[in-house]
Amino acid sequence: MKHLIRMFVSLLFPAFMLAGVAASPAMAQDKAKAAPAAKAVKGKAVRKVLFENDKVLVYEATFKPGDEAAKVARPFRVIRALNGGTMQRTYADGKTEKIEWKTGEARPVGPDPVYTPKNIGKSDVVLYIVELKQAK
């Protein structure tokens, strides 16, 4: 009986491994199709949504030197710099604030009043952002 169980498990395990290897590329393709790449527009930051539901929005924002994002009020969020650099916030009243991001640094931010973020450095700034949505 033990011999029969061992033989069954020894055949079953490789079958599951083979099925997993065959299914993984197909699943990866589906995910890639679900999140189309945002079109790069000169002077505008590229925002790629990675996950979204009714409570949270997770996205990656890429700012090339001189790029800026749209003017909006920002809710509470956690930001991690995948590639650091120098950013500038310009608030609705004209006040500016310089922000330095170090690669790998993470910090909680906001909620903030309306401002426009702009990359004023010489290298790309890539931020991974987890934003909490307002309860409806």
Image: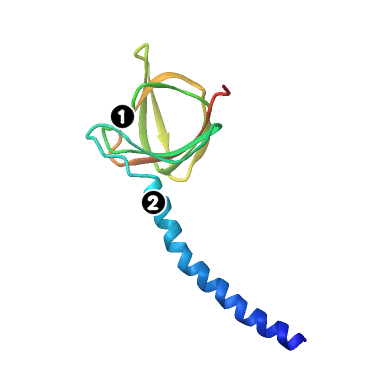
Q: Quadrant of the N terminus?
A: bottom right
Give the structural element (helix, strand or loop) at label 2.
Answer: helix
Left or right placement of residue 101 versus residue 67 in this view:
right
Label 1 crowd (10 A; few <14 / some 14-19 / many >=20): many
Q: Amino acid at mark 1?
A: Glu
Residue mark closest to the camera, 2 vs 1? 2
Q: Which residue is mark 2?
A: 32
Residue 109: percent from left, percent from top: 51, 29
Residue that sits furthest to the bottom in the current view: 3
Quarter assignment of residue 86: top left
* Mark toward the start of the polypeptide (2 vs 1): 2
Q: Which residue is mark 1?
A: 68
Q: Amino acid at mark 2?
A: Ala
Residue that sits furthest to the top in the current view: 93
Label 2, label 1: how far apart the Cα atoms are: 26 Å
Left or right placement of residue 101 versus residue 20 in this view:
left
Left or right placement of residue 13 versus residue 52 in this view:
right
Residue 78: percent from left, percent from top: 52, 35
Q: Quadrant of the C terminus?
A: top right
Residue 132: percent from left, percent from top: 54, 30
Residue that sits furthest to the right in the current view: 1
Q: Is residue 57 above or below residue 31?
A: above
Q: Is residue 76 above or below residue 24?
A: above
In percent of the image, x 39 and y 56: which residue is there?
29
Quarter assignment of residue 98: top left
Q: Nearer the viewer, residue 19 or 51?
A: 19
Residue 2: percent from left, percent from top: 76, 85
Count of numbered badges drawn on the protein: 2
